[in-house]
Amino acid sequence: MNDNPKRDVEPSSAEATVASPSDTPSLKRSAETTDRQQNRSNKGRPVKRNKKGGEDNNKKRRREGFDENRDDRDLPANPGSYANEEQRKILHLDNLDENRIKYPEDAKTVKRKVALLLAFIGKDYFGFQVNPGRKTIQGEIELALYRSGMLSEINFGNPFKYGWSNSARTDKGVHACAQVCSLKVEVLESDIDDSFRDARERLQQRLPADIQVLDMLRTTRTFCAKTTRDRVRYQYMIPSFLLHPDYRQLLVDNDIPLEGRRDTARTPLLPEEIEKLRSKLLPYRSTDEQRKLLQTALEKYLGTKPFHNFTKGLSPGEPQAMRYIESFTVLDPLVMQGMEWIPTQVVGQSFLLHQIRKMISMAVDVTRGVISLGVMDRALTKEEVVVVALAPAQGLFLELSFFDGYNRRKATQNPELPDLDFLNDGGRSRWEEFRDKVRAHIADEEIADGNFLYYLYQQECLFDYRHTQTEKEYASDENECET
């Protein structure tokens, strides 16, 4: 049927000589009524239309034969969920129901929207989000929810059924002290009375030791962890030896070649060479002047800037590259495992893929004298294309998430619900304990694997920014800088 109401109602010849349907209010209303009646869906809802008058349906879903009347109970499990049989085979997960709780038939259970305040060590996981064929944080949490009785068999494997949302996505190897996930869970009525203390403990017992539930809090029904978060704070730990004034001479003194290892770019140093360098660099301590210069470099990122050079897949001028950085601070140095570390703390509304690691990499290059602050200025313009190296993931962790806006609205509309705050009386000690655990893990991992030693060798010898390239070439180098 044509969408134009003038042609939906045919006037008589007598009426036509007096007025057209568009000029006659009664005929126009009749046409519009007919149009609405004939364009209702099977469920009695009007068909949504776009600005051009066509049906506003998702073309991809229609092309794939999407059925609005389908039974979601028959949907296959998400390919990255442990409920998926293929995923279990890849990960060698044999017993899905191991240590699973089943509530007694006479138990009174209720469904409630909650926020999980999570912390984890990301070393053994391929990022946070479910990923087919990979072990992920979300996959482990969903399995623990199922085994603790909080997810039914029908919902297990399909996160959208229980309203899953997470406030941040972390890369492979990145840690977190303050991840927030929202979802609906089925719990005992007694769990609500004790502020989910027992429910949190049941869930924790079914999680690996490197994933911890710091708190479980009841939220409003409309709470969404992804869209409600106001700000987020990350911390990046920089080993002070990255600022060593003459790293190349140190290589020469220890008979380590400065070139010829591009074929082994990811692991360019031999184990015995790693040991030699570590023994020489372990006692190194940064100076006040170096930390001040590092702070000056980090402050270049403050405000709303284009960060297309600090991520993947974005071109100059794309609106998605604009990000607001509230603060970027150098904290007092820490000594762990005999090695000095410089913690840096960045607060922003949201971050692009690899953005923080690339910001750190360029700021460190400024501090160690490879480039000037002018190169940073060019990298932060809308027009310039600058290839920036990627600092190791092992130094980065999500430190804190903020939900100030949600807490303010809840205080007036639902004052009986708790604030969403990692630093509340119940969770602060667990948060501080895990943050210290993450820092210690970063130090232990560097001693064991030498990720930052590899990174420094790549910067000095494979990409050779300090000695063989001008600043202009630094800003246009097509070498693969990501490791």
Image (cartoon, helix red, strand yellow):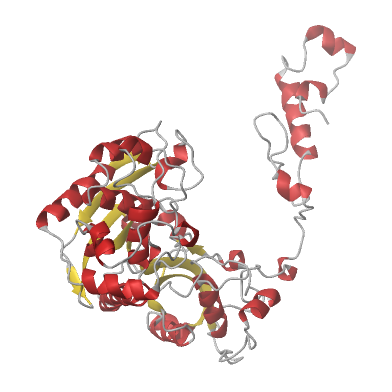
Residue 476 drawn at (x, y percent): 41, 38
- Asked whether the viewer can see residue 402, the reply is no
Report which quarter residue 198 is drawn in. Answer: bottom left
Quadrant of the frame with the N terminus? top right
Position of 92 with respect to 29 (left or right) is: left
At 78% across and 20% down in the image, what residue appears?
Answer: 6
Instruction: Tell me: residue 169, above or below residue 102.
Output: above
Quadrant of the frame with the C terminus? bottom left
Residue 122 drawn at (x, y percent): 43, 71
Residue 165 drawn at (x, y percent): 50, 62
Residue 339 or 235: which is nearer the viewer?
Answer: 339
| Number of marks present in the image shown | 0
Position of 222 with respect to 78 (left or right) is: left
Report which quarter residue 114 is drawn in. Answer: bottom left
- Asked whether the viewer can see residue 290, the reply is yes
At 82% across and 22% down in the image, what residue appears?
Answer: 7
Position of 65 with respect to 181 (left or right) is: right
Residue 51 or 481: which is nearer the viewer?
Answer: 481
At 61% across and 66% down in the image, what residue appears?
Answer: 161
Instruction: Tell me: residue 259, above or below residue 394.
Output: above
